[in-house]
Amino acid sequence: LSFPAIMRKDGKIYIYPENYKSGKLYLYEYDLNTNQCKLAGVLCDVPLTDAVYRNIDGIDYIFSTRGENPNGKNLGVYSRGEDGKFTLSNTILFQENIARMAGDF
């Protein structure tokens, strides 16, 4: 697992490391008392790479490239659905192969 991005929400700490080879983006809850992570669910049923979560104007988004072409020109914008999972809502096309986040905003 790589790119261990951290999300803080509702007083809890979550980690969503890249693991695109699994085909999904998993969310883990970090327990401060036990210093352990436990699976909290699936954020997205797509093999995302270097995903970055942001809440913008009250809407939850994930920005990421996909595992099939992680270093390409297409940056996917995923928004959270009513089921809690993120699905593709927009794509940003760059002129060069610079779409992969490879770090936080």
Image: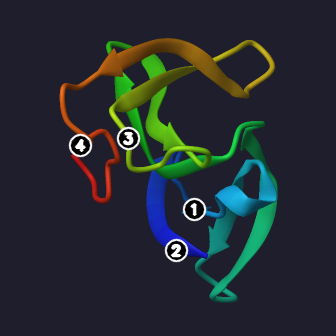
Residue 37 - label:
none
Helix, strand or loop status at disc 3? loop
Q: Looking at the image, is mark 2 or mark 4 earlier in the sequence?
A: 2
Label 3 – label 4 distance at C-alpha: 7 Å
Tell me: residue 29, above or below residue 69.
Answer: below
Give the residue type at disc 2: Ser
Q: Residue at x 47, y 52 (%)?
A: 7
Which quarter of the rendered picture does the N terminus lie within? bottom right
**In-image side of 41 versus 37 (left or right):** right
Q: Circles 2 and 4: CB distance less than 8 Å?
A: no
Please provide percent x and percent y for residue 65.
47, 40
Q: Residue at x 79, y 59 (%)?
A: 22
Of circles 3 and 2, the one toward us is 3
Give the residue type at disc 4: Ile
Give the residue type at disc 3: Gly
Helix, strand or loop status at disc 1? strand
| Neighbours of disc 3 within 10 Å: few (<14), some (14-19), many (20+) | some
Picture quadrant of residue 77: top left
Label 4 – label 1 distance at C-alpha: 18 Å
Tell me: residue 32, above or below residue 100.
Answer: below
Q: Nearer the viewer, residue 93 or 50?
A: 93
Please provide percent x and percent y for residue 91.
42, 16
Label 4 belongs to which residue? 98
Label 2 belongs to which residue? 2
Give the residue type at disc 1: Glu
Label 1 belongs to which residue? 18
Q: Nearer the viewer, residue 54 or 23?
A: 23
